[in-house]
Image (cartoon, rainbow, N blue to C red):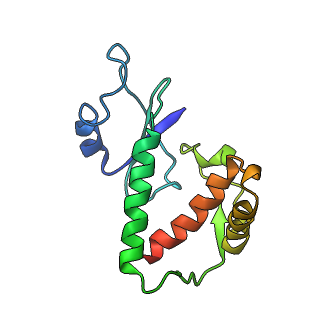
Amino acid sequence: MPHVALTEPASAARRKINGPLASRAADQPPQFRLLPSSVHSRYRVMIMLMTEWHLDVSLAELRRSFNLLLDHVEATTEGDIIRLDEDYFWSIPQDELYAVDSVPSNLTMGQLSWSWQHLTDLLADPDQAIGYHLVWLAEVLRAIGQKTH
């Protein structure tokens, strides 16, 4: 399954493979697959296929990063409310979201107000927390991140 998309001229991408992407097993050479031109018309896009690739996310570092970024948003926002001017957004179903070797065929629509409602409902009843609340939070955070400088 592809995990790292390089969207730059193919010759430059090949030169970088032994740099930041060198976390692959030493005995496994990288494999490349060119995406169809409909995926990205300006550059040749290469996908590096990595076996058993994973990302370890430290919860302590995640919490520190989130707190730092929330402090930034508070410092750059007047008042304690952020007004989001958009409500609907395109959403890619989970089974297609990380399949970067093909163009998503089943776009759906999401709604920020609906995602926010799930989060405020959670505040009223914290025992109802499920992992998908993180997805709803991410949708709202994306909108805030795109609005905040």
Residue 115 x %, y %: 69, 66
Residue 145 x %, y %: 46, 69
- The residue sitting at 61% across, 49% down in the picture is 97
Residue 63 x %, y %: 45, 50
Residue 92 seen from this side: no
Relative to 30, is 86 on the left or the right? Answer: right
- The residue sitting at 43% across, 38% down in the picture is 58
Residue 50 seen from this side: yes
Residue 9 x %, y %: 30, 50
Quarter of the image for residue 5 reads top left
Q: Where's the N terminus, which quadrant? A: top right
Relative to 71, is 106 on the left or the right? Answer: right
Image vertical order of residue 24 relative to residue 146, above or below: above
Image vertical order of residue 45 relative to residue 82, above or below: above
Image vertical order of residue 142 relative to residue 135, above or below: below
Q: Nearer the viewer, residue 121 or 40?
A: 121
* Name of the residue lying farthest toward the top: 27
Q: Nearer the viewer, residue 49 or 141?
A: 141
- The residue sitting at 71% across, 50% down in the picture is 129
Q: Where's the C terminus, which quadrant? A: bottom left
Quarter of the image for residue 46 reads top left
Relative to 122, is 65 on the left or the right? Answer: left
Number of numbered labels in the structure image? 0
